[in-house]
């Protein structure tokens, strides 16, 4: 009796379960996925609409004027007046060389000039003396000419042949002395010209020696920071020896854009520059020039395209971007730092 009751209970439970309606699968995950895809598409469209107004590249870096400091003359370093990473102003003294040799050269040049001045005075006196000798010779010639004419007018029977020959010989000798005196004047003038030329050369030597003396002081060609200082007091240096580098205060950006992007880039366009060393800040700048030549054409070994193995490669052209943001002075900026410029393209 109990077994029949249990069976009847189980049958009633199974009937109840079969009468419960089956619940459908939830659509919420599908809806969420569709919304996410729509948001991604919308975000991509917005990004494309925004990005198409900008030309950017990661092949860009800070550039600046780097001056290599080197002496113009040889000498021993007497003093080094700046330190590594120190800021200097234009015209500030960086290095001083020993001045002994150059001062001796100046004194020697001045002494040679004084000798040249004396030589000019001597040659002028010689020229004056030669001119006076011409006057004396011409006076003697005039006397000899009168004597000769007097003898010729006299009756030949009244004078001897000896006196006539003597007068004629004296006339010829007087003429020869005049010619010699005139040649001496010409020689004296030439010697005076040479002496004046030697004086001008002596003046140039004095100027050159004085100029060389100024080269013992090496000054900063521009304002900036000292870098790569290798010179030490007591070093003996030769002309052109690198002493240090001076990184100028003015910076700009050299950005290498693909040649296919140059059609949209023009001088004067606004640029937002992001420097890796200063994250989160976009500095204001402008395009100031586009190089007339690709980077590869100015390389040490340009590519030779006139071969059968030519492969077309998209070239890059340097674009110069100049900062116009005063905030730049608040941060440590140096040539070689990586940047990302965004040139705002104006669509017509």
Image (tube, rainbow, N blue to C red):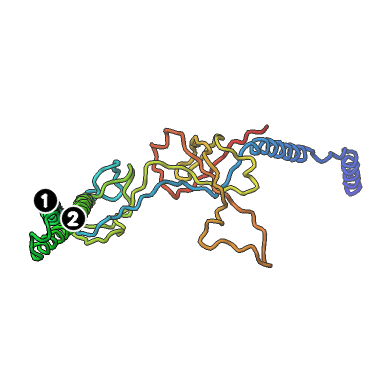
The residue at 43%/42% (across/down) is 251
Residue 346 appears in the figure? yes
Mark 2 highlights which residue? 182
Q: Residues within 10 Å of mark 1 (few under 14, many from 20)?
A: some
Q: Quadrant of residue 306?
A: bottom right
Q: Answer with mark 2 or mark 1, whichever residue precedes in sequence.
A: 1
Q: Which quarter of the rendered picture does the C terminus lie within?
A: top right
Q: Nearer the viewer, residue 102 or 268?
A: 102
- Where does residue 256 sit, x and y in percent of width and height? 55, 49
Q: What is the spatial separation of the Cα atoms under label 2 and label 1, in whole angstroms? A: 13 Å
Q: Which residue is at 13% across, 56% downward?
A: 148
Give the residue drawn at x 16%, y 58%: 175
- Disc 1 is placed on an element classified as helix
Name the disc covering residue 139, or none. 1
Q: Is residue 332 left or right of residue 315?
A: left
> Are the residues at dot 2 and dot 1 in contact (C-beta closer than 8 Å)?
no
The one of 70 and 122 positioned closer to us in this rendering? 122
Instruction: Determine the secondary structure under disc 2.
Output: helix
């Amino acid at each position: 009796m109990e077994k029949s009751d249990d069976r009847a209970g189980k049958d009633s439970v199974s009937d109840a379960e079969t009468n419960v309606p089956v619940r459908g699968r939830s659509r919420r995950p599908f809806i969420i996925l569709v919304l996410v895809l729509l948001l991604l598409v919308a975000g991509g469209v917005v990004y494309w609409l925004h990005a198409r107004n900008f030309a950017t590249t990661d092949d860009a870096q800070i550039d600046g004027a780097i001056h290599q400091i080197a002496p113009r003359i040889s000498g021993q370093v007497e003093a080094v007046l700046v330190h590594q990473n120190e800021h200097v102003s234009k015209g500030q003294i960086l290095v001083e060389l020993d001045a002994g040799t150059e001062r001796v050269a100046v004194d020697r040049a001045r002494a040679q000039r004084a000798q040249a001045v004396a030589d000019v005075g001597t040659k002028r006196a010689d020229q004056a003396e030669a001119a006076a000798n011409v006057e004396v010779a011409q006076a003697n010639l005039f006397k000899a000419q009168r004597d000769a004419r007097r003898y010729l007018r006299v009756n030949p029977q009244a004078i001897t042949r000896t006196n006539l020959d003597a007068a004629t010989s004296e006339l010829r000798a007087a003429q020869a002395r005049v010619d010699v005196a005139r040649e001496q004047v010409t020689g004296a003038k030439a010697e005076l010209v040479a002496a004046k030329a030697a004086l001008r050369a002596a003046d140039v030597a004095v100027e050159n020696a004085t100029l060389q003396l100024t080269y013992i002081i090496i000054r900063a060609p521009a304002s900036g920071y000292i870098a790569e200082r290798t010179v030490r007091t007591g070093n003996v240096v030769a002309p052109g020896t690198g002493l240090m580098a001076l990184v100028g205060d003015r910076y700009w950006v050299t950005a290498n854009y693909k040649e296919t992007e140059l059609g949209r880039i023009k001088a004067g366009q606004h640029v937002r520059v992001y420097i890796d060393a200063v994250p989160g800040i976009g500095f204001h700048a402008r395009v100031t020039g586009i190089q007339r030549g690709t980077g590869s054409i100015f390389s040490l070994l340009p590519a030779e395209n006139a071969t059968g193995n030519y492969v077309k490669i998209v070239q890059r052209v340097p674009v110069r971007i100049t900062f116009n943001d005063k905030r730049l002075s608040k941060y440590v900026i140096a040539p070689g730092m990586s940047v990302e410029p965004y040139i705002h393209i104006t669509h017509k």
